[in-house]
Amino acid sequence: MNILKPRKILVDNLINIENLLDEITETEELENINLENYKESNIEINDITIEKSILHNTDIIDSNLSKNTFVEIEFDNCNFSNTKFENCTFIRCRFNNCKMTGDSFIDSLLNNVSFTESNLNYANFAMANMENILFDNTVLRNSNFQENKFKNIVFKNADLTQSQFFKSSLNGIDFSDSIIDGIIVSIEDLKGAIINEFQAVDLIGLIGVKIK
């Protein structure tokens, strides 16, 4: 699958900022910024747009970042644990080596977004519209996908142990090289999904069949 990545962002062309909260008090749109080694918790930032920027070693935890728009952003080695990204828009964004445990993406739009070597345990993607999404070597244990609109979703060496899919068609999605132990899904949603022979043995219990 061809995911449209952020255009090559040259650090030399970015404006270094030290305090995100100070910047957004003066404007609702930030572009070409470099935010590095920024640490905050229990903050609320809403209704802003950030474009063509890099966030590196940034920690914003236990916070509310809902109703924001992120366009062509590289998130590198960031920690957003227990943070709300509800009703947000992510377009051409990359998350690399990020910790996002317990994050909520409810009602968000994600288009051409990749998550690589990241931790999304207990993440909630309920009612999110997701197109051209890659989860690469990413942990999604106990994550929740509910009433999603999926188009071109790739799970590559992902860990979906005990994750839940409810009213979200998995037709055409390949789980064959991922871990799906204890996955919770209906037979109807599972139709058309691609799995390997070992996974088939685990999932056969969904139709009430026991192997002797």
Image (cartoon, grey):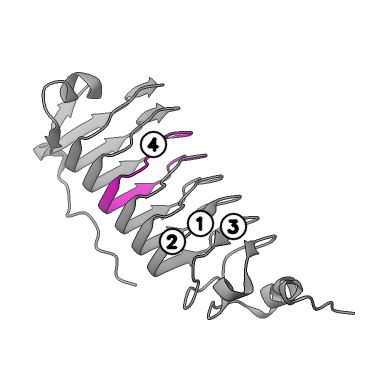
Q: Position of residue 15 (x, y in %)?
A: 12, 31
Q: Earlier in the sequence, mark 4 or mark 1?
A: 4
Q: Do the residues labelled 1 and 2 touch (CB within 8 Å)?
A: yes
Image position of 156 (left or right of 50): right
Residue 176 seen from this side: no
Residue type at the position of mark 1: Phe
> Disc 4 marks which residue?
78
Q: Earlier in the sequence, mark 2 or mark 4?
A: 4
Residue at x 78%, y 75% (from the top left corner): 208
Residue at x 17%, y 53% (from the top left corner): 8
Residue sitting at the far right: 212
Image quadrant where residue 57 sits:
top left
Q: Do the residues labelled 3 and 1 touch (CB within 8 Å)?
A: yes
Q: What element carries label 4?
A: loop
Give the mark toward the camera: 4 or 1.
1
> Disc 2 marks which residue?
148
Q: What element carries label 3?
A: strand
Res 145 label: 1
Q: Earlier in the sequence, mark 3 or mark 2?
A: 2
Q: What element carries label 1?
A: strand
Q: In which quarter of the image is the C terminus?
A: bottom right
Q: How crowded is mark 1: few (under 14 residues within 10 Å), some or many (20 or more)?
A: many
Residue 67, compared with residue 154, is above or below; it is above
Residue type at the position of mark 2: Asn
Q: How far apart are marks 1 and 2 (CA)?
A: 6 Å
Residue at x 47%, y 78% (from the top left corner): 172
Q: Residues within 10 Å of mark 4 (few under 14, many from 20)?
A: many
> Disc 3 marks which residue?
164
Residue type at the position of mark 3: Gln
Image quadrant where residue 61 sits:
top left
Q: Which of 196 and 9 is in front in this view?
A: 196
